[in-house]
């Protein structure tokens, strides 16, 4: 894992621990490859990336938005300090 991501994940866990008593939750969505790559890469390069993603496609902004809505809802009030890998099942970071 790159050091920057590791630092952010550690910060979020600490923030969650410090602010939980006030009803504040803190979580991260760790995004995988998204559809915006389609405008910036050749089809050959895209196919190579997609072949490494278990669901067989790039992520979609609407799906990410839905996850953000969930994380900001009362239904996720018990979830804090978590990194959610939103990457189509990819095992690479």
Image (cartoon, rainbow, N blue to C red):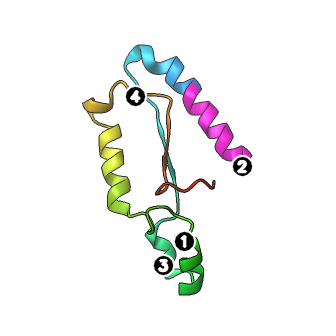
| Residue under numbered circle 1 | 51
Q: Mark 4: few, some, or many residues within 10 Å (few <14, many ≥20)?
A: few
Looking at the image, can residue 79 be seen? yes
Q: Nearer the viewer, mark 4 or mark 1?
A: 1
Looking at the image, can residue 42 be seen? no
User: Could you give the CA–CA distance between mark 4 and mark 3, rounded to whole angstroms?
Assistant: 33 Å
Asked if the residue at tag 4 contacts the one at tag 2, i.e. Cβ–Cβ closer than 8 Å, the answer is no
Q: Where residue 62 sits in the image (x, y, percent)?
A: 32, 60
Q: Mark 1: few, some, or many residues within 10 Å (few <14, many ≥20)?
A: few
Q: Nearer the viewer, mark 1 or mark 3?
A: 1
| For marks 2 and 3 on the same chain, the one whose residue lies earlier in the sequence | 2
Q: Secondary structure at mark 3?
A: helix
Query: What range of the chain is rendered magenta?
Result: 1-13
Whether residue 25 is situated above or below residue 17 in the rendered picture: below
User: Could you give the CA–CA distance between mark 2 and mark 4, rounded to whole angstroms?
Assistant: 24 Å
Q: Residue at x 69, y 46 (%)?
A: 4
Asked if the residue at tag 1 contacts the one at tag 4, i.e. Cβ–Cβ closer than 8 Å, the answer is no
Asked if the residue at tag 3 contacts the one at tag 4, i.e. Cβ–Cβ closer than 8 Å, the answer is no
Whether residue 42 is situated above or below residue 55 in the rendered picture: below
Asked whether 8 falls inside the magenta stretch, the response is yes
Q: In the picture, residue 13 is in which quadrant?
A: top right
Q: Secondary structure at mark 4?
A: loop
Q: Residue at x 32, y 37 (%)?
A: 72
| Residue under numbered circle 4 | 79
Q: Nearer the viewer, mark 2 or mark 1?
A: 1
Q: Residue at x 58, y 24 (%)?
A: 14
| Residue under numbered circle 3 | 38
| Residue under numbered circle 2 | 2
User: Could you give the CA–CA distance between mark 1 and mark 3, rounded to whole angstroms?
Assistant: 14 Å
């Amino acid at each position: 894992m790159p050091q920057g991501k590791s630092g952010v994940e550690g910060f979020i866990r600490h923030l969650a621990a410090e602010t939980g008593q006030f009803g504040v939750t803190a979580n991260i969505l760790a995004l995988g490859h998204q559809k915006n790559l389609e405008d910036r890469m050749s089809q050959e390069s895209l196919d190579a990336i997609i072949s490494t993603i278990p669901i067989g496609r790039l992520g979609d902004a609407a799906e990410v938005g839905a996850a953000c809505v969930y994380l900001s809802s009362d239904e996720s009030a018990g979830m804090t300090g978590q990194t959610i890998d939103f990457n189509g099942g990819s095992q690479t970071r």
